[in-house]
Amino acid sequence: MINISPRQLEVFAQVALLGSVRAAAERLHLTQPAASMALAEMERQLDEQVFDRERGRLRLNARGRELLPLAQELLERLAEFGRRGGASEALAGELRLGASNTVGNYRVGELLGAFVRAQPQVAIRLRVANTEAIAAGVLDHSLDLGCVEGPVAHPLLDVQPWRDDALVVCAPLDHPLARRRSLAPEHFAGAHWVLREHGSATRAITERVLAQLPPGRTVLELDQIEAIKQAVAAGLGIACLPEVAVVDALAVGRLKALKTPFLDLQRKLFLLQHRQRYRGALLEAFLQSI
């Protein structure tokens, strides 16, 4: 009979998250031999490996990917049992959240503020990356929840709208487009653009905008909004940027928002969850807070 312990499940889940037994042992306050033994014993009982060993890194194989969400659910249910059976039902533990750049850098207070104030004993680990990377993290169960700037289509993802958002086309104050009293699409012919990297939802919307305008030229591709703001302020080109990210630069006159009513610059922000992910007390409390 298989008799896998909670400790073995913890080691399995942490190795899946961190990619190495050493890192998992540190996170769980174990010695590395103890963590290795726990993982080896779990695999012995299963009579199969759950990781592929690649140059010192452990990567989940197909069986591991199948078992990881179940292991995470069992650990969360055990923690919930302990809370309900103990003297206090205060939430504790860890939430692994992912946010695309606009959310992680400019809306983090909206995303986390209420929950952090209400649940001070819960540790929040926030990863900020582009939409493609956050979706991948939710899919491989390294993230419990993602908040991104654009819709993501995948059969294993539950995608729910969270907030409305808008972009603006920004230019330096001395740019010819910034000096025009009114603009039309033809005025953008030959414009130099600074774009986000591929995989970013802002990049996808910018490409949609460019398709509505005469051909221009991409002069830079950058992976950070702040870097794009600096490039535009330095006169290197114009850019399509989240409105929330340029409020400060517009207020002090470093950038000018071009009036482009002929462009659709509205979008929504979305929450991503894995359809197979158990929604325990921590995740439910967080979702209710936002």
Image (spheres, helix red, strand yellow):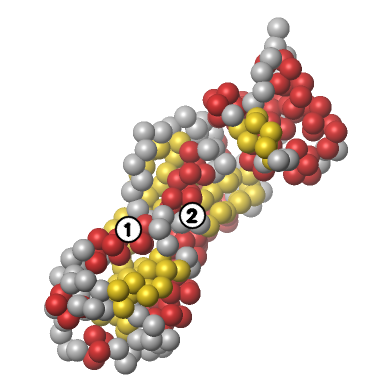
Kind of residue at disc 2: Ala
Q: Residue at x 32, y 58 (%)?
A: 204
Give the answer, above or below, for where 164 lies relative to 10: below
Q: CA distance from mark 1 to mark 2?
A: 17 Å
Kind of residue at disc 1: Ala
* 206 relative to 100 in the view: left or right: left
Identify which residue, 278 or 157, lies in the foreground.
Answer: 157
* Quarter holding residue 6: top right
> Can residue 163 be seen from the camera position used here?
no
Q: Residue furthest toward the top?
A: 1
Q: Position of residue 234 (x, y in %)?
A: 43, 86
Give the answer, above or below, for where 280 lies relative to 193: above
* 144 relative to 147 in the view: left or right: right
Residue 99, label in figure: 2
* 45 relative to 186 in the view: left or right: right
> To which residue does mark 1 refer?
204
Q: Position of residue 29 (x, y in %)?
A: 81, 41
Identify which residue, 239 or 125, lies in the foreground.
Answer: 239
* Quarter holding residue 38: top right
